[in-house]
Image (spheres, rainbow, N blue to C red):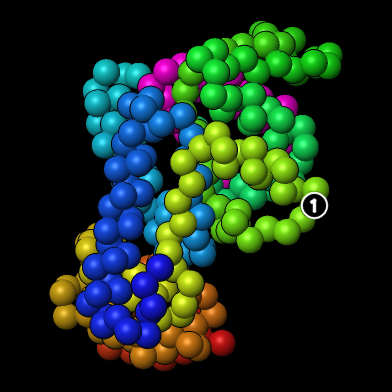
Amino acid sequence: TPAVNTETDEEVVSRLRERFEMLEALTGAAKKGKIRSLIISGPAGVGKSHGVEKRLSKHNVLATLSEQELPYTIIKGAMSPIGLYKALYKYREAGKVVVFDDCDTIFEDTLMLNILKAALDSKAKRTICWNTESRVLDREGIPDRFDFQASAIFLTNIDFETVKSNKLRPHLDALTSRSHYMSCDITTDRERRLRIRQVAEDGLLKDSGLDADSQTQVLDYIDNNFDSLREQSLRTVVKAAELADAFGANWERYARVSLLK
């Protein structure tokens, strides 16, 4: 990683733009089945989900026109082992993608980790097994073993390379060895601020109802108050735009109350 204190703002933005363009390209490769697993690590709110969903959503129109189910699913939040097994079964076919967005609890459960290791095995045939009786699977007609041919993408706030837990380390190493691992390369507040502005300027607010001048005012407000924001993320930019659209010239009064610490 370049020494950020020697980079201009333009150089930082260029570096991060290239990194996230690579994220989108890797997502496309996963969709084509060229990559079976991709782990993307980085802080919350900088556009990991935005880049992945942007690439995968290119398939939405075609699926709608052909009245087919979308070839991908995005799973957010907590998940149980049986829920994981069912999701992988439903999206098991080649050409499909299962995206785990902010599901870091799956990395803390040994059973789920073992299911994932089977799903992402480097062998040509990847067989996932459920080795205990399950009324849920019986009721839904899901077999206790199946071959998984799809791809998986993990969006996580965990930096796998720095985890020191003796319990987790072997499992994370096993997942990393089965996956392409990419860090978003954002480690400072400056990089986070510049990345958030870059994504916003690239079209995040195009459907906000604001004209170009108002959008710029929103972004300048985020920049000028960055250290005081409750949450330094793209979601805060969207919230600020909502206030600007709702309250016009007085919106910053409301932003001070709802967006700042």
Q: Is residue 182 magenta?
A: no
Residue 141: name its quadrant. top right
The residue pinned by badge 1 equals: 166
* Residue 189 image point, x, y percent: 46, 80
Choose between 70 and 114: the one closer to the eye. Answer: 114
Choose between 222 and 113: the one closer to the eye. Answer: 113
The answer to whether residue 55 is above or below residue 209 is above
Choose between 100 and 15: the one closer to the eye. Answer: 15
x 27%, y 18%: residue: 66
On the question of residue 71 being in view, the answer is no
In this picture, which residue range is highlighted in magenta?
Answer: 72-97
Lateral position of residue 115 relative to residue 76, left or right? right
Residue 143: name its quadrant. top right
For the N terminus, the image quarter is bottom left
Amino acid type, callout 1: Asn
x 61%, y 38%: residue: 175
The answer to whether residue 55 is above or below residue 146 is below
* Residue 206 image point, x, y percent: 22, 62
Q: How many labels does the image show?
A: 1
The answer to whether residue 34 is above or below residue 53 is above
- Dot 1 surroundings within 10 Å: few (below 14), some, or many (20 or more)? few
x 56%, y 28%: residue: 120
On the question of residue 122 being in view, the answer is yes
Lateral position of residue 217 relative to residue 156, left or right? left
Choose between 60 and 199: the one closer to the eye. Answer: 199
